[in-house]
Amino acid sequence: MRRRDGFTLVETIIAVVILSLLVLIGLPKMSSAMAQNDLRGARTTMVNMVAAARAASVQSNRLTWIKFVGNTAHVLARPRLVAVGGAAVEPSDTVGTVRDFAGVYGVTVAPEVGVDSIQFDPRGFGAGFGGDASIVLTRGGHSSTITIDGLGRVRK
């Protein structure tokens, strides 16, 4: 009798088919979990931006706001601490970095209709949006809503 080393072609094909079926069963759950994880990360980043805007307004006694441009957001503060000569428009300081939610998390940012920014007065209270403001973050059929009340607090 001859000794065999390795697997036959049929055995290898059966193993590949079984492995492929397991991957096909688990792939939708994995992609859904990854979308929810990215959404959770984007939500945490947005809540941190709200906290940074409130803190900057109170600490520097200036108006601050979170400005939304497409799927990016950044915190601005006005008036500038260092004057810029010859500026026709009152410039503002950028607090922190510009956050690209679509690039980092693959998330779509949608503030309330007609709202392009959320403003905080020097006391840290929400201003300029009359009551509550909502931001909806969406990715892959999943969404998360962040609501900021008139006192500048984030509600779940």
Image (tube, rainbow, N blue to C red):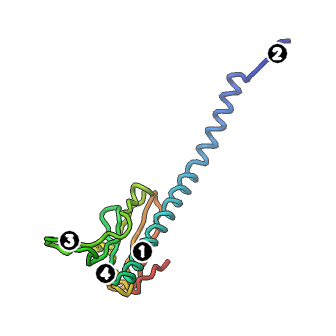
Residue under pointer 4: 63
Residue located beneath label 1 in the image: 52
Q: Which residue is mark 2?
A: 3
Instruction: Choose mark 1 or mark 2, whichever is in front.
Output: 1
> Left or right: where does residue 21 sit relative to residue 129?
right
Left or right: 3 in relation to 58 = right
Contact? badges 1 and 4 (CB < 8 Å) = no
Inter-mark Cα distance, 1 to 2: 71 Å
Residue drawn at x 53%, y 60% is 37
Mark 4, secondary structure of its residue: strand
The residue that label 3 is drawn on is 84
Query: What separation in Å lies between label 1 and label 4 (alpha carbons)?
Result: 12 Å
Q: Mark 2 or mark 4: which comes first in sequence?
A: 2
Which mark, residue 92?
Answer: none
Q: CA distance from mark 1 to mark 3?
A: 24 Å
Position of residue 60 relative to residue 43, above or below, is: below
Contact between marks 3 and 4 (CB within 8 A): the answer is no
Q: Position of residue 129 (x, y in %)?
A: 31, 81
For discs 2 and 4, the disc positioned in front in the rendered view: 4
- Circles 3 and 2: CB distance less than 8 Å? no
Which amino acid, by three-letter code, is at mark 1?
Ala
Quarter occupied by residue 92 = bottom left
Residue type at mark 4? Answer: Leu
Q: Residue furthest right?
A: 1
Q: Are marks 1 and 3 in contact (CB under 8 Å)?
A: no
Relative image position of residue 1 (x, y in whole percent) = 86, 12
**If you read the primary sequence from the N terminus, does the residue marked by circle 3 or circle 4 appear first?**
4
Q: Earlier in the sequence, mark 1 or mark 2?
A: 2
The residue depicted at 49 percent of the width and 59 percent of the height is 38
